[in-house]
Amino acid sequence: MRYFNLILICCLSLSAVAAEPENLRSDKPLSPETWEHLRERLVLLNNISYLPTLLPIIMKNRHALELNEAQVSAFREWRRNHYQDMVDTMNEIIRKRIALTQSAVEPEVSAEALFAMQDEIFTLQRKLFELRLSCRELVTSTFTDEQWSNFAFIAAEDPQIAGLFVR
């Protein structure tokens, strides 16, 4: 039953991310509502990554963060170039985790096959980590000290990331 619940949650996550309201590879700005939609969908997938998804929160609050045009353009460019690959990779990790879980209870599947499946998941997790690090690098290289302070204040109001700024 526990595995069924995991599979159900994963399937719901996949369907939640599959249909996006706007073309994410477009150069056009996304509305605050669309950034919020993306943030909500990524929350469903966040438990398979070790880095938080910050870009939707940053873009939703770009005015409060006082982002300059160069920053906004750079973040939009990152989204256009990497967002879909990130989501596709997350979805592939979910699919492979489901397959691994199902295979683990099949007596004819060897331990070597299970190790191979796990290695595929590790490779995908590494790819996802690298994608998210590229976004993190963009943020950390462009944010001013004041923007970091403003972001910490904004993050304190968001239950998904509020604990990140506690030291």
Image (cartoon, rainbow, N blue to C red):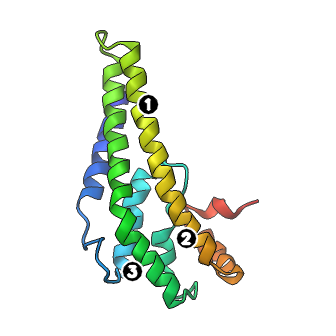
> Which of the numbered marks, if any, corresponds to residue 163?
none
In this rendering, position of residue 158 left or right of residue 131? right
Residue 62, how many percent across, how many down? 51, 83
Give amino acid for label 1: Asp
User: CB under 8 Å between callouts 2 and 1?
Assistant: no
Q: From the image, tell me which residue sits under label 3.
A: 32
User: CB under 8 Å between callouts 3 and 2?
Assistant: no
Could you tell which of marks 3 and 1 lies nearer the N-terminus? 3
- In space, the residues marked 2 and 1 are separated at their CA atoms by 29 Å
Q: Quadrant of residue 111?
A: top left
Residue 99, how many percent across, how many down? 30, 30
Residue 3, how many percent across, how many down? 35, 29
Mark 3 Cα shell of 10 Å, populated few (<14), some (14-19), many (≥20): some
Q: From the image, tell me which residue sits under label 2.
A: 138
Q: From the image, tell me which residue sits under label 1.
A: 119
Give amino acid for label 3: Pro
Task: Assign a secondary structure to mark 2.
Answer: helix
Q: How many labels does the image show?
A: 3
Q: Nearer the viewer, residue 87 or 116?
A: 116
Residue 145 versus residue 120 in the image, above or below: below
- In space, the residues marked 3 and 1 are separated at their CA atoms by 38 Å
Residue sitting farthest toward the right: 167
Mark 1 Cα shell of 10 Å, populated few (<14), some (14-19), many (≥20): few
Residue at 47%, 78% in the rendered image: 74
Give amino acid for label 2: Leu
Residue at 32%, 44% in the rendered image: 92
